[in-house]
Amino acid sequence: MRMEFVEIKAKAKINLSIDVIKKREDGYHELKMVMQTVELHDSIRLKAVKSGIELICNHPFVPSDSRNLAYKAAQLFLDKYKVKSGVRIEIEKRIPVSAGLAGGSTDAAAVLKGMNELFSMGIEDSRLMMDGKVLGADVPYCIKGGTMLAEGIGDILTELNPLENVVVVLIKPGLSVSTAWVYKNLDFGKIVDKPDMDIVVEAINSRKIDVLAKNMRNVLETVTAEKYNIIHHIKERLVELGALGSLMSGSGPTVFGLFEDRKTAEKAYNTINSGKWECFLTHTTR
């Protein structure tokens, strides 16, 4: 029986480490990274309509047509599974745009999962993940969520022990970064501080947050943080304010800090949240 409407959380992700192994012949980059869901989320509301796709969003810079990844996800679902009606998508954005937090990918993933529920299709997550790969490398992860080692172009996923309820402060400075620009300007000769993924994974699996925080690395900082020194400044400031460690997420420019307890994190958040940057106090989740 078809449901009247579905509401679903589209959760943001952070990268607890990123290594770029090589550039592939197809133009993509071979990656090895740890991805982690956080509670910060967009809210997606889906409703069946007679035909077509309607998309509205509360963020003025988010397109409401086929340029939007959530729109593309809906089109893919309607076409592939031969759904006879259409869908209305309402997106309440909380995740910053162009921030390195998978905002577009997680919205697309939520649409695939939500339409599966809305139209009572009963499609397994593994199949939706294969569908999502066509839309973007982060979409399969966003369908699954949690704590994952991601390899290949980010689509080969290995579950790690869930790293839930670690307090996180997120800071997005007032700039946007193109992922394509970051990878285009990545110079392997400038990468000297690569993550030791064995240490990172072991720290996660044994929940040694202090060891994880001290060993987090993101090689994409050699591009983004070198151009925008504010990223280095925010990382240093978060550590000064009590973060166990701090890192740029994805291709940036968002920076996060991991905290041992919520009280310290709240104090850091209140100190740094002056209205100049987008700031969020959140925590890791499945």
Image (cartoon, rainbow, N blue to C red):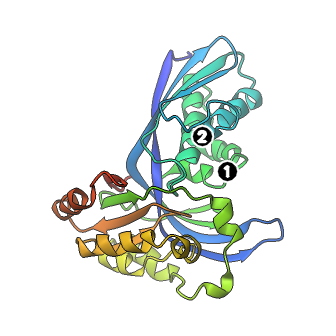
Circle 2 Cα neighbour tier, 10 Å, few/some/many (<14 / 14–19 / ≥20): many
Please tell me whether mark 1 sits on a helix, a strand or a loop: loop
Quadrant location of the N terminus in the rendered image: top right
Please tell me whether mark 2 sits on a helix, a strand or a loop: helix
Q: CA distance from mark 1 to mark 2?
A: 9 Å
Identity of the residue furthest to the top in this view: 50
Query: What residue lies at 57% left-to-right and 37% top-to-bottom?
Result: 62
Residue 257 appears in the picture as rendered: yes
Query: Relative to residue 209, is residue 250 depicted above or below?
Result: above
Residue 272 shown left or right of residue 160 in the figure: left
Image quadrant in which you'd find residue 172: bottom left
Q: Amino acid at mark 1?
A: Gly
Residue with the mark numbered 2: 108
Viewer-proximal residue, 215 or 269? 269
Q: Which of marks 2 and 1 precedes in the sequence? A: 2
Residue 86 shown left or right of residue 281 in the figure: right
Image quadrant in which you'd find residue 209: bottom left
Query: Relative to residue 54, is residue 33 depicted above or below?
Result: below
Circle 1 Cα neighbour tier, 10 Å, few/some/many (<14 / 14–19 / ≥20): some
Residue with the mark numbered 1: 136
- Residue 268's x, y, as percent? 23, 63
Residue 136 shown left or right of residue 113 in the figure: right
Q: Cβ–Cβ below 8 Å for labels 1 and 2?
A: yes
- Residue 201's x, y, as percent? 46, 74
Query: What residue lies at 34% left-to-right and 76% top-to-bottom?
Result: 236
- Residue 109's x, y, as percent? 58, 42
- Residue 42's x, y, as percent? 45, 39
Disc sitting over residue 219 in the figure:
none
Task: State how many labels appear.
Answer: 2
